[in-house]
């Protein structure tokens, strides 16, 4: 896996989704995202590991799930219902659970 390419946040022409870069590796005929990079953070998808400046950040599995949904839809609005459906499928959860993860 290669490191994420740096993004210039001071670039006014950068689209909102340009603040998130993807690192891909070819493990199958289809291209899979190996990591999402945003600011000093890198979320390694397969390992479900969040790093900040190459140091491990301890987060719960549901926080990783929430981050993945938001990163997959970078640059777009993700409504509460979408998050609830993806992070807690087939489970009734109060909104405070979602708020805690955000």
Image (cartoon, rainbow, N blue to C red):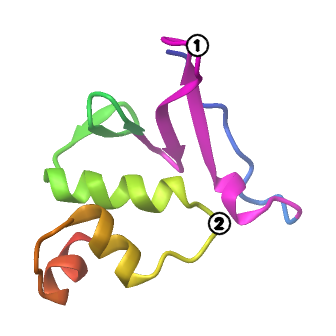
**Quarter of the image that includes the C terminus:** bottom left
The numbered dot on residue 75 is 2
Query: Which stretch is magenta?
Result: 13-42
User: Residue 75 location in percent, x, y?
Assistant: 65, 66
- The one of 45 and 50 positioned closer to us in this rendering: 45
Q: Is residue 22 above or below residue 29?
A: below
The secondary element bearing badge 2 is classed as loop
Residue highlighted by disc 1: 29
Name which residue lies at 28% across and 54% down: 65
The answer to whether 42 appears left or right of 21 in the picture is left
Could you say which quadrant of the image residue 30 lies in?
top right
- Observer-side mark, 1 or 2, equals 1
- The one of 51 and 10 positioned closer to us in this rendering: 51
The secondary element bearing badge 1 is classed as loop
Name which residue lies at 37% across and 35% down: 45
Question: Looking at the image, can residue 28 be seen?
Answer: yes
For disc 1, the neighbor class at 10 Å (few under 14, some 14 to 19, many from 20) is few
In the rendered image, the residue lying farthest to the bottom is 95
């Amino acid at each position: 896996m290669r490191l994420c390419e740096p993004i210039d946040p001071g670039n006014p022409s950068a689209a909102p989704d340009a603040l998130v870069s993807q690192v891909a590796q070819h493990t199958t005929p289809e291209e899979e995202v190996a990591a999402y990079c945003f600011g000093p953070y890198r979320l390694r998808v397969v390992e479900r590991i969040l790093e900040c400046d190459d140091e491990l950040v301890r987060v719960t599995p549901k926080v990783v799930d929430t981050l993945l949904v938001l990163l997959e839809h970078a640059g777009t609005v993700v409504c509460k219902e979408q998050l609830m459906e993806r992070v807690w499928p087939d489970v009734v959860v109060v909104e405070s659970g979602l708020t805690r993860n955000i």
